[in-house]
Image: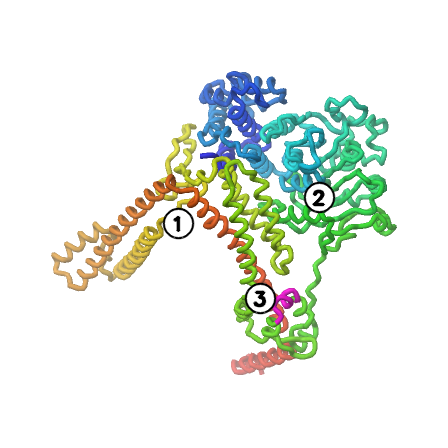
Amino acid sequence: MAIKKSELYSSLWASCDELRGGMDASQYKDYVLTMLFVKYISDKYKGDPYGAITVPENASFDDMVKLIGNAEIGDKINKQILNPIKEANKLNEFPDFNDDNRLGKGKDLVDTVSNLVRIFNDTSLDFSGNSAEGDDILGDAYEYLMRHFATESGKSKGQFYTPAEVSRVLAKVIGINQKNSSNQTKAYDPTCGSGSLLLKVMNEAGKNIDLYGQEKETTTANLAHMNMILHGAETATIVADNTLSRPSKFNSKEDGLPKFDYVVANPPFSLKSWSNGVSIENDEYNRFALGVPPEKNGDYAFLLHILQSMKANGKGAVVLPHGVLFRGNAEGEIRKNILKKGYIKAIIGLPANLFYGTGIPACIIVLDKENAENRKGLFMIDASKDFVKDGNKNRLREQDIRKITDVFDAFAEVPKFSRMVSMTEIADPKNDYNLNIPRYVDTQEAEDIQDLAGHLLGGIPEKDVDGLQAYWDLFPSLKADLFSPAREGYFELKVPAEDVKTTIFNHPEFVDFNRKMHDDFDKWLHEQQMKWNSLEKGFGIKESFEISTQTILDHFENNALVNRYSMYQHLMQYWNEVMQDDFYSISMDGWKAGNEYIRLVIKGKKGKDGKMAQDKDIPGLAGIEGRMITPEMMIHYFFKEENASLQDLENQLNLTQEALAEIEEENNEEEGVFSDLEKINLKNVKDFYKIRKAENASREELKYIKNYIDTQEALGGITKLIKIAKENLEIKVVAQYPLLTDAEIKDMVINHKWTLVLQNALNNEQGKLSQKLTQRIKELAGRYQQALPALETKTTEASRKVMAHLQKMGLVW
């Protein structure tokens, strides 16, 4: 059975992390990712004389496996496998697998390296079988591991990874796509790290593009090179050197810096040593014509380098700390000069704490030299409040990425989110070319102002009720059913606060709205079901799914209450968790992939002797995993009666256990029937029954004891029946997998799996909108429930009663 992305990623991370021991993740990643790389190229290119990568004779992953347990495994991997691969493919240095400072000494090193090889020596990790169109399963696994290693490394060692979500935004806002790119199109990242940004650009361009990257750290440059190969970008050029002091010419014969169609970058923030080796006054590349950055801050040095690397109509996007937008002095002068040239097309403010190397907020500066001299303004987006907490970091959700890119593509002005700002306003002396986004985009939420008259005289202010106008537009009579006029400008609640939710849910207008929304959504689902039903082996995965994502956004575009990006998030989350695995399975093997299942195993762990224990099968239905169809789906579809009988037995078991517990509780006290027994179990109670019967115990006592015995035996019988029922159900489920027809598989996957999740997503959003209305009304009702004079009267009365009690007690006179 082909590898599922979700399982591959999590199992690789868990296994590798377990072996890491005390080594820092930023170092250990080099070994794990090298192993992944060698395994991949061995599976894909071994014995292929025309392959994009050469796997030399006796230098494949299989040759690594032969070294497991060898006392010289580290040295042999270096010399016999990695070095030949490096030389044959002109790669940079691989990590040292014989480094006893990192991997341990003597036997510890042998065990660590051997076990690392064992992790990848798994029959399920046959990467040659993952050939579905657009399937970057290995590249994505690489990125997954990189993200986890970055998270584990802490702030100082996370520079080697740019969050994929940020990379995707940059790649989209530069405007590259399959229509405007070709084999002559060039994209460049001057600080490419592990290469994720360049690969996201390639994803947008459809691989019709030449990729170039430069990275200061040699080991990280090697990671980037491997990452390119894993993603099918074998021809990408990655150079290991300092971009600012020794920018690569990439074999260009032209004077100055090579020019590129697209440039993307996430440089190290506020680099203090940027000028080391840079001849600022006599820079042969003329990068500082618009100004010289501060000696201890290299943000603008990278920005100027990027501008100089762009063609006359080139596009670019760079991530920089938020301070570049408003810092003064030398940086302020450079910013003014860049703005006067018209090079900045847009600015996107990002949430704080997105990046692994720092918690400060950052922004994306979008550059465009085409028609720059005619640019009259720039577009600003404040996306700083749209994110989700993910551990100790923040992360952009799918809905956040899509909202940013949709708004950017349309240059749509969205209240409290985006605005087109004229150069006249930016140049105005009150702003003086300061680009701090809050100056131009007001994101402050309206303050929930307390109404003094409402507190003094009671009543819910009319302005607060009118603040819910979006609901009253859809449910005009609901307002009249919930509120009645109290006096001019104020309302009172007509129903008890605890009945507000029920009133809303049962209101005819609300019911009709929900029904219509479900009917319309069912029509959308039916269209999708027809498209999904026509999927065949080899279909275009990304194109097919992108149609669904666009249509769900279009469907909810004009919905006044349900946020279309929230529905998009539901779909994308399900795609990432489940649906993409199903799509890839269908594309690779057709719908017959639904016939496949495996028996899950518990991985053997390393014992005290350092050896790995054998894997063990997980028994029962819990150990069965279908490639596309779960055992639970199979049971619900084919074996409802058998499952109902099993449920009846389990209910009987619960009732019998409760009865047994009750008997034990009643008769286990000091004076209870079983008080003399050290341990209450079936054998002891049976022996006790014989003794008490021989002693002519009372009929009532013997009845109690016999009742316990009968209940225990009944419990044992039911337990056996349940075991038999489960075994029979398991046999039937396993036998049914190969018998499934394509029609049955389609019905189960499309209608009983995908569709149900999306219907539940709509229910979830409907629940949110009614809950939001309910909570606001209850909040307002509670706030102005009692006027101040009434509260003063109650307080006076309460004080009088307390004083009377104190007088009775003789404590006051």
Q: Nearer the viewer, mark 3 or mark 2?
A: 3
Q: Residues within 10 Å of mark 2 (few under 14, many from 20)?
A: many
Part of the protein shown in magenta: 469-476
Mark 2 — residue?
362
Mark identifier at residue 637: 1
Instruction: Where is residue 653? Give x, y as percent.
Output: 30, 54
Magenta span main SS = helix
Is any part of residue 503 visible from this angle? yes
Instruction: Where is residue 169? Give x, y as percent.
Output: 67, 42
> Is disc 3 in contact with disc 2, using a CB cutoff of under 8 Å?
no
In the depicted view, which residue is nearer to us: 467 or 595? 595
Q: Residues within 10 Å of mark 3 (few under 14, many from 20)?
A: many
Position of 760 with respect to 372 (left or right) is left
**Residue under the point 21% across and 50% down:** 683
**Residue under the point 83% across and 32% down:** 288
Point out the tag, 3 or 1, that comes first from the N-terminus: 1
In 3D space, how far apart are the residues under numbered discs 3 and 2 (Cα atoms)?
Answer: 37 Å
Point out the tag, 1 or 2, that comes first from the N-terminus: 2
Q: Nearer the viewer, mark 1 or mark 2?
A: 1
Which secondary structure lies at badge 3? Answer: helix
**Residue under the point 73% across and 22% down:** 251
Mark 3 — residue?
774
Mark identifier at residue 463: none
Instruction: Where is residue 453? Give x, y as percent.
Output: 70, 75
Q: Quadrant of the C terminus?
A: bottom right
Which secondary structure lies at badge 2? Answer: strand
Dividing the picture into quarters, in which one does residue 539 lie?
Answer: top right
Which secondary structure lies at badge 1? Answer: helix
| Residue type of the residue flagged with mark 2 | Ala
Q: Quadrant of the N terminus?
A: top left
Q: Residue furthest right?
A: 429
Asked whether 780 falls inside the magenta stretch, the response is no
